[in-house]
Image: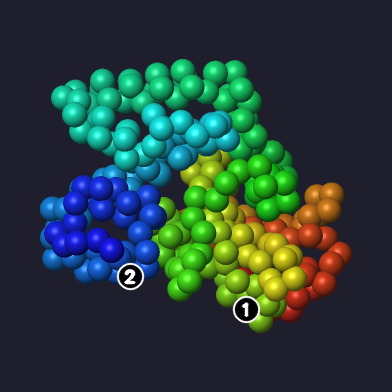
Amino acid sequence: MISLPPSERDLHAYVDHQLSDADRRALDTWLASHPDQAAQVRAWQQDAQQLRAALGGALLQPANPALDPAMIRQRRKRQTQRHLASAAVLLMAVGIGGFSGWQAREMTLVRPSLLPMTDALQAYRLIAQQGMLPADYKVADNGDMQRWLDRYFARASRLPDLTAAGFQPVSGRLLSTDEGPAAMVIYEDGGGHKVSFYVRPPGPKNTFLPRGSRSDGDLQAQYWSGGGYNYAMVSPVDTPVTSLLKQSQSF
């Protein structure tokens, strides 16, 4: 249980989604009446987002205390020159990643393709099927996945409501693509079947997509654009899950 006013440790835990729902609500209320501290927290959240996107697959490396976001922010706070802080983060990422870190990054950085939303299909395989990347956020009791997604894609469409098909959002992951930062939300039903909602910007050429679908091996992607972003729902092909999603008409 946190105390108010919160300590710096409490604020870091808030940014890193380590607080209970009750503590998070209490801090939300406190920050609403303390604009200076709220602005600092928002800056830390932006730093965390940029770190996740920049390091991408390097998060597959063994846990390293030097990469803890709270410790990185503390080091940057102590430095007097912003360019020195940026150089330190860069050197740290290169130093701990090495060749293996670059290979891991390549698994989450999708190259351009003539086929729409190839990155969404690849992300599903890496995360939902193979479990190769850990979640950035998991829904606990009364968790709010929409609120997590809004931190990084505030103008994006709302998360699809798949309750009619028996699916609920359970976890989220930030990714990096050639088009910019992306996010994938995993849905799961009572039988353990998984589908994903994927969102990313259209890229520098503003390549928006007409509504459509395509299959790729054992997966199917239904894709569209809106609100300045591209989206895809990815699910296994030729299973009851796919037909239920088509019947739900909720995205």
- In the rendered image, which quarter contains the N terminus? bottom left
Residue at the bottom extreme, as displayed: 164
Residue at the front extreme, as displayed: 1
Type of residue at label 2? Ala
Residue matched to label 2: 22
Type of residue at label 1? Thr
> Looking at the picture, how far across and down is residue 196, in whole percent?
64, 59
Residue matched to label 1: 163
Given residues 144 and 61, the one toward you in this image is 61
- Local packing at callout 1 (Cα closer than 10 Å; few below 14, some 14-19, many 20+) is some
The quadrant in which residue 114 appears is top right
> Looking at the picture, how far across and down is residue 152, in whole percent?
41, 53
Residue visible at 25% across and 30% down in the picture: 76
Q: Is residue 35 left or right of residue 183?
A: left
Residue visible at 78% across and 68% down in the picture: 242
From what the image shows, is residue 13 above or below residue 205?
below
> Looking at the picture, how far across and down is residue 208, in whole percent?
57, 52
From what the image shows, is residue 73 above or below residue 36?
above
